[in-house]
Structure formats: C-alpha cells, structure tokens
Amino acid sequence: MAKRIDVSGLNIFYGSFKAVEDVSMTIEPRSVTAFIGPSGCGKSTFLRALNRMHEVLPGARVEGKVAMDGQDLYGSGVDPVQVRREIGMVFQRPNPFPTMSIAENVLAGMRLNNKRMNKKAATEIVERSLRGANLWNEVKDRLERPGSGLSGGQQQRLCIARAIAVEPQVLLMDEPCSALDPISTLAIEDLIAELKEQYTIVIVTHNMQQAARVSDATGFFNLAAQGKPGRLIEMDSTQKIFSNPSEKSTEDYITGRFG
Ligand SMILES: Nc1ncnc2c1ncn2[C@@H]1O[C@H](COP(=O)(O)OP(=O)(O)OP(=O)(O)O)[C@@H](O)[C@H]1O
Ligand SMILES: [Mg+2]
C-alpha cells in the first residue's frame, strides 16, 4: 500500500506571497519522514501541498511537481478528492466530529467518499481501523458513544483510525502530539512505528527527541528572513541529521541555539 513521493522544484503560494520555495525531495515508502524547523518556515504549508489540501484556500496555488509512484498528482485530469483519499492527513489538534459516535467517526471519511457499505462491512472497517490505531481495546464497549467523550490522546488515535479507514497509501501528520501528554505521545509514537510497516508516513514535529525517536529521514526547513519563503535546508537520514548535519543552521537548530 505504501508509495513513494517525489517532489521537484515545488513553490507554494498564498496569493502573491511565496511561502515555500524550490523544494525537491524523495519520501520513501514504509518509512517515517520528519520535518522540523522554526515556526512559520512552511512545514504545514508543504505538508498540505502534498495531498492538494493547500489549494482549497482562495488564491493558494503551487508550481512544480509532486508525484506518487511516478504519477503527477497535479497533472490534468487528476481528481484532488482522490488524491486526498490516497494521502490522508491527521492534524495538530484532535478533531473528531463531536456529535458523531466513535464508530461513525471512524467511518466519516468513507461516507464522504460516498462508498456504500453494508452493516457487516462497516462493523469490520470500524474494528480493523480502531485496532490499527491501537484504540480498539479502550473503546470496543462504547462504540456508539460520542467521540468527544474520549481523552485527548484517545481522540487523536480516533482521528488516526478515521484516516486509515479509507486505506490511504500515505499518512501525513502535522504535529499530531503537540496537544498530548507524554503517555499519549508515547502511544502515538509506538503506533507510528507500527504503521510504517504498511504506510508512507510524514510527520511534522517541534519535538527534536520525537523526530529522533520515530523517524528514518529528517528534513530541516528554514527561512532566510521574516517574509522570505521557507526552504528545505537539508534532508538526510535522521541519524545523520542529528549526529553530523552538513549545514551549520541545521546544527544550530537541533542543538537549540535558535528556533
Ligand atoms: N492561510 C494562509 N494565508 C496566508 N498565509 C499563510 C496561510 N497559512 C500560512 N501562511 C503563511 O505561510 C508561512 C508558512 O506557514 P506554515 O503554517 O506553513 O508554517 P509552519 O512551519 O507550519 O509553522 P508552525 O511551526 O508555527 O506550525 C507563514 O509565513 C504563514 O504566515
Ligand atoms: Mg505548522
């Protein structure tokens, strides 16, 4: 299921403002890629450009190429809704639909995709997705209760279950642990380690230890100055980035000298 993503010469705009400039990279399948860098350098913007969520804002557009296993995701005739189905996203704050039950939350993406399914199939998808998100044992006796009744860490795992229910190829996570306590954070990190067996995973994090713990490759983004576009400064194996980065600004950032 996991697929490779190749980005070349990507520029990302909000109207006339160029937020991200000239990014090229390869994101390997069945691995975790982390993006780090100071606030405002375009990490979230870049993540949203990978699954065509960026362009839903008026005036927002991209130049350059994003390909998944060689297919140009911005090519003519490509349906952005299909792209978002294949490249799922989990946001910083857990955002379950508050009035929906836990089970309905898991199925919400499938319903949006207009997939018809019978009750048996739905029950199976709910269980498989909740097991995949390491939440099944905690919620199996209350599937019909509202998703908003879960703890923050459970809600985030519910959102991950919702994202994997549609069987994406790639999972994008934008600071998925920033609203969570350390125990829930570890639960999500364990889950990411399991999910990478099947998916291509990209995670944005401000937590250096987390990037070092969970990721195989790390990309460091930075801005030359306020108001300038963010750029990918360096991308390499996580081990290399955290032990012997090529760029001084990467070293300054990971050792906490700025950002
Ligand atoms: N909807 C928007 N309209 C206009 N500009 C935006 C919009 N969203 C983000 N930007 C700008 O794009 C740049 C990159 O923002 P982005 O949110 O991608 O940064 P980030 O690296 O994710 O930061 P953080 O670590 O704080 O989440 C910033 O200058 C930001 O102000
Ligand atoms: Mg962000």
Image: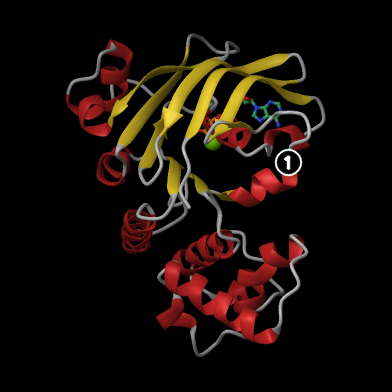
| Rendered-image quarter of ligand 2 | top right
Q: Quadrant of the C terminus?
A: top left
Q: Quadrant of residue 133?
A: bottom left
* 95 shown above or below 28: below
Give the total of numbered labels.
1
* 47 shown above or below 159: above
Which residue, given by chain and number where applicable, does mark 1 sit on? 80
Measuring 28% from the left and 27% from the top, which residue is drawn there?
A: 254
Q: Is mark 1 within 8 Å of ligand 1?
A: no
Three-letter residue code for mark 1: Pro
x, y percentage for residue 210? 31, 44
Q: Residue furthest left?
A: 243
Q: Is residue 53 visible?
A: yes
Q: Quadrant of residue 149?
A: bottom right
Measuring 63% from the left and 80% from the top, which residue is drawn there?
A: 121
Measuring 57% from the left and 75% from the top, which residue is drawn there?
A: 125
* 80 shown above or below 189: above
x, y percentage for residue 178? 44, 49
x, y percentage for residue 38? 44, 26
The way the protein has been coloured in the rendering is secondary structure
Measuring 36% from the left and 60% from the top, which residue is drawn there?
A: 191
Of 23 and 40, the residue lying toward us:
23
x, y percentage for residue 100? 70, 75
Q: Is residue 255 visible?
A: no
Q: Residue furthest bottom?
A: 141
Of 171 and 190, the residue lying toward us:
171
Q: Residue furthest right?
A: 58
Q: Residues within 10 Å of mark 1 (few under 14, many from 20)?
A: some
Q: Secondary structure at mark 1?
A: helix
